[in-house]
Amino acid sequence: MRRGILAAALGLGLSAVLAGPAMTEQSQWGPYQVGDVRSGYTYAAGETRDMQDDDFVNPAMLWVDSGAELWETVDGAAGKSCASCHGDAAESMAEAGTKFPVYFEPSGKMMNLEQRINFCRTENMKADAFKWEGQELLRLTTFVRNQSRGKPMNVKIDGPAAPFYAKGKEFYETRRGQLDMACSSCHVDNAGNMLRANLLSQGMSNGFPTYRLKWQGVGSLHRRFRGCNKQVRAQPYDYGSEEYVNLELYLADRARSLPVEAPAVRN
Amino acid sequence: MAWRLHSSLRVVLSAAIFAALPLAVAAEELVAYKITNKTSIENSLTGKPGDPVNGRKVAINRKQGNCLACHALPVPEQPFHGEVGPDLSAAGSTLSEGAIRLRIVNPKAVNPDTFMPAFYRNDGFTRVAKKFQGKTILSAEQVEDVVAYLMTLKGN
């Protein structure tokens, strides 16, 4: 089925080349482009896209598979696993990957998927929270997000989320660090341009957690934020910080309607 | 009562220790310069001409000028040249030395919206990483070396 879609996408890509500029780029990239919004997939090298497209080659499927085991693993004083309450993740988590971060009433803040998983662990399972960017949290997050693969990103930014969205947007547009650059300096103003050997993408978040060839492993969106901040010689924020969760909300809206790709493969 | 005494003592002690430490991030003293007509810095920051051979190295070095990140330069041995900023192959025949100098020192003086960092500025930034606080990207000497290098680029 997925092969069929890929073949169709490739076929369309080829005909777009043959037909010239009359064909829109939309058809070239299939679901990976919605209007002007382009997934990082469309900026990735062909061999990188091939890695993502084939589950038997995509190295991040190891995280999905081991995450599936964690889903079933009983842990904590309550003697529960994720499955004890949520059953079959394919059903119960089908939308989870599309809608985080969500407003969380008890804290009065936004909560992302990693934080939701850890909330379940500490409150419902009576287990220890997984460490940020530790392999267990990456595995489970990748597994859960993967249940929504192919579904459009659909985060809520109105109501109680609105002020957090505004903060995320402000972060995105604020120059920072000794290089004095904002997220938007690269990912809006210069998307599609080469920055030395790197092709700047629109910085879409729909593929996270992502396997990066540079990392030789799966990493969270917040790891990517920290990397970007360090590259402009700015002090990064902590994993799971309010600043990054708000930024995550803004990015989720930027990527609205793009399909969840987790786990994507990128350079 | 005992706790309060202890607590206030700690405050006094930590304040004393803190005051004894040198400021963690004292800003470097920068060479003063004058901007002419909002377009150029006429005088060399070091009072002498830069070294174009070293300037070429600084322009290539990823931890120094890294000009190639954004600009194309006549540096054939480096495979990747950025396309964020203009091609600089003829910078030396299209801009004056003073105009080039200002664009390296602080291009925001020419265009506040530019993507380009200010290579000789050490304040007015947001949340700079600790190891770069109070520091410029390039030294005054390195700025002059890059100016001298760019002035040698006259296109074909």
Image (cartoon, coloured by chain):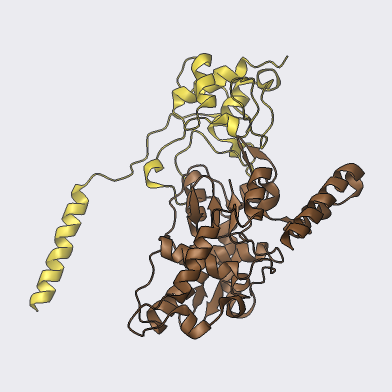
Chain colours: A brown, B yellow
Q: Which residue lies furthest to the left in this view?
A: B2
Q: Which picture quadrant has residue B26? A: top left
Q: Which of A239 and B142 is in front in this view?
A: A239
Q: Is residue B122 at all visible to an observer of this figure?
A: yes
- Quadrant where the C terminus of chain A is found in the figure: top right
**From the viewer's perspective, is A110 left or right of A46?**
left
Q: Which of B151 and B16 is in front in this view?
A: B151
- Quadrant where the N terminus of chain A is found in the figure: bottom right
Q: Residue at horizontal 18%, vertical 48%? A: B20
Q: Is residue A166 at all visible to an observer of this figure?
A: no
Q: Residue at horizontal 37%, vertical 77%? A: A75
Locate residue A194, reporting x and y percent. Answer: 65, 38
Q: Residue at horizontal 51%, vertical 44%? A: A214
Locate residue B71, reporting x and y percent. Answer: 64, 30
Locate residue A17, reporting x and y percent. Answer: 86, 43
Classify A118 as above or below B138: below
**From the viewer's perspective, is A133 left or right of A154?**
left
